[in-house]
Amino acid sequence: MEPLAKGHSSAAGGPMGPPLPSLLHAKDSYSPQELSQYMEHILKWTHAMQERERKQTKKIQDLEHRLLHVEKNYKHNQAHTNRFCNGTFIWRLQNYMKMRDDAMKGATSVQHSDGFYTALYGYKLCIRVNINATDSIRGAYISLFVHFMKGEYDNIVEWPFKGCISLSILDQTEDCLKRKHLRETLIAKSELLAFHRPTSYRNHKGFGYMEFAPLSVLENGSYLKNDSFYIKVEVNTG
């Protein structure tokens, strides 16, 4: 080991103590003073590294705590926004090509949106989208469904749900006058379980379109930009 000059600093910072004896040229024995200096240096270096690790761990913990706080605030704000959307909800889906590739390989490509309310004291719903609908049309169509979810005001809203729900995939053409959204409207059918009061977190039964739109239409039109597309839901409870 090369001898260290006085005042030399390690990666942890701070002086590392007196010079150490050179170990490049071995000798039969070292004086007690040389060994003592060497051990003192090792102890100081070890302490400095432990202190540096402690500080780094503390910084990581602080960053993780801040991240959790930001995530919690985001979810709270998102839930607040979805409460006041008045039955109109727009969902941006990213990583379309991965969804499509997974579907073509036979993997599950189902995604659910966040829940949203039809009114301040209304029904709670979410959207389900998937590409691998059935073996016969796997990877060929995009499927859209709505699912009713357990909400805070299920005790006072009317069941089964009666109304209509419009589903759209939005055209992202820059000229708004040339946009041609893909839109379908469904009418609630009270005999279907999809429109009954949820008994679990989200109704297992949804209602919508297995073949909402061919993937070729999405990919050849202006519905995809930056590997993302938008789904819009409008709920009319009248």
Image: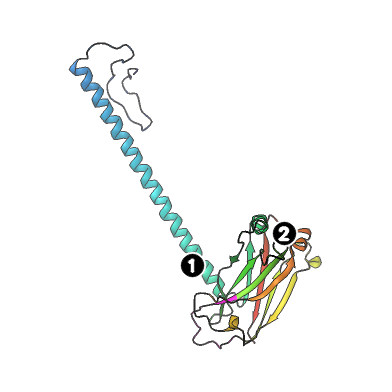
Q: Residue sitting at 32 percent across and 11 percent down?
A: 25
Residue 222 shows up from this direction: no
Q: Residues within 10 Å of mark 2 (few under 14, many from 20)?
A: many
Distance between the Cα atoms at labels 2 and 1? 29 Å
Prevailing SS of the magenta stretch:
loop
Callout 2: helix, strand or loop? loop
Check the image and report above or below for 102 versus 123.
above
Image height check: is 170 above or below 54?
A: below
The quarter holding residue 187 reads bottom right
Name the residue furthest right: 178
In the figure, is residue 177 to the left or right of 236?
Answer: right
Tell me the amino acid under the disc marked 1: His
Label of residue 76 in the image:
1
User: Is mark 2 in CB contact (under 8 Å) with mark 1?
Assistant: no
Say what secondary structure mark 1 lies in: helix
Residue 47 x %, y %: 28, 34
> Could you tell me residue 149's position as x and y percent?
54, 76
Q: How is the image coloured?
A: rainbow
Judge the density around disc 1: few (<14), some (14-19), many (≥20) Cα neighbours within 10 Å: few
The region drawn magenta spans 147-160
Picture coordinates of residue 28 (x, y %)? 23, 11
